[in-house]
Image: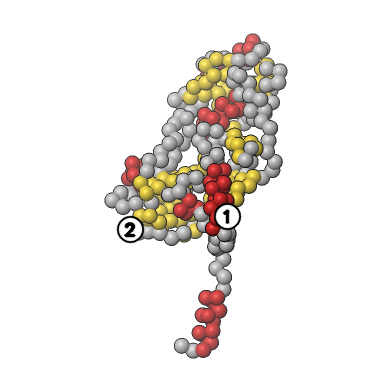
């Protein structure tokens, strides 16, 4: 080998490897996030939704779900795991059920697997609930040289904080004595530093009304909401506008209810998200076209939009 070739190769090897930085579109269920991941088995690429769950140690696949993709369930090993086009190499998964989202409680079923800390601990993750929801990934080259005793204590505090996040039950979490609304607050999880941080200051949530604007059930047609009873004053106006029991609700504050979880809908209807909510509905269940009405939580009344 020529001398200049040896020198060039040596310089190339000595160059620092640039850490991967990418983002993945995500779907949010209260405090939980799911993304699409590509797995390779026997040369076949399979794309599945997975739950990103930093408070779980081991990544898993759901054999009852992934079998429908053509996956050979005699093994749970992926020859390659690909996130947003970035390969993170082979991975041995464990088997565990993970299909927790069942319509109509959630707008879409999830998930075929879980990404746990055995994959996540090489990244710094930023969870962004905004429109559109996504996760930003920054691969960390190596872990810091923290003394063993201090590292263990810091890790324990860090994992205790993680346990409060990624909940399917609530998007309001309490971490280190402060409360955060994960539906509007991005946050960052840095595994290499064992650090959790939130964008902005903690919030003081609005006091929720004892009763929601209306009781509801999911209708089988298009996953609209079927009104089961109204609360608040000025119900005469609501009925004049065609809003009463049996009415089908389409949107809350301009967002289609078909894409919202039950928790999101109930949070809005209890006044946790704002002082007013605009309700879009089918007047006479479609025969009279669409209509709108506003509910004012401070005054506890229905008003015209």
269 shown above or below 149: above
Identify the residue at image location x=43%, y=60%. 89
Query: Is 282 displayed left or right of 91 in the figure?
Result: right
196 shown above or below 108: below
Q: Which mark is residue 150?
A: 1
Front: mark 2 or 1:
1
Q: Secondary structure at mark 2?
A: loop
Cα separation between marks 2 and 1: 43 Å
Mark 2 / mark 1, whichever is N-terminal: 2
Q: Which quadrant does the C terminus fall into?
A: top right
Identify the residue at image location x=56%, y=26%. 266
Q: Which mark is residue 98?
A: none
238 and 49: which one is in front?
Answer: 49
182 shown above or below 91: above
Seen from this angle, which residue lies furthest left?
A: 74
Rendered image quadrant of residue 234? top right
């Amino acid at each position: 080998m020529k001398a200049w070739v040896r020198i060039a190769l040596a310089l190339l090897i000595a160059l620092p490897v640039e850490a991967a930085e990418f983002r993945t579109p995500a779907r949010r269920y209260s405090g939980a996030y799911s993304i699409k991941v590509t797995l390779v088995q026997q040369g076949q690429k399979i794309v599945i939704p997975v739950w990103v769950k930093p408070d779980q140690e081991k990544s898993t696949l759901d054999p009852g779900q992934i079998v429908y993709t053509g996956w050979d369930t005699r093994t749970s090993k992926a020859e390659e795991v690909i996130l947003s086009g970035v390969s993170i190499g082979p991975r041995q998964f464990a088997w565990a059920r993970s299909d927790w989202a069942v319509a109509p409680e959630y707008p879409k079923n999830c998930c075929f697997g879980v990404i746990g800390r055995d994959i996540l601990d090489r990244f710094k993750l930023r969870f962004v609930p905004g429109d559109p929801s996504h996760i930003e990934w920054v691969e960390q080259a190596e872990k810091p040289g923290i003394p063993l005793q201090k590292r263990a204590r810091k890790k324990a505090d860090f994992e205790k904080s993680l346990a409060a996040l990624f909940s399917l039950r609530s998007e309001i979490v309490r971490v280190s004595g402060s409360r955060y609304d994960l539906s509007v607050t991005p946050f960052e999880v840095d595994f290499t530093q064992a650090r959790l941080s939130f964008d902005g200051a903690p919030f003081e949530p609005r006091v929720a009304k004892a009763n929601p604007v209306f009781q509801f059930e999911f209708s089988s047609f298009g996953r609209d909401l079927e009104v089961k009873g109204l609360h608040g004053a000025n119900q005469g106006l609501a009925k004049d506008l065609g809003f009463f029991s049996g009415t089908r609700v389409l949107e809350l504050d301009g967002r289609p209810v078909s894409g919202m979880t039950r928790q999101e809908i109930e949070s809005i209807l209890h006044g946790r998200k704002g002082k007013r909510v605009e309700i879009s509905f089918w007047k006479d269940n479609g025969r009279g076209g669409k209509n709108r009405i506003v509910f004012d939580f401070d005054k506890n009344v229905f008003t015209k939009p």
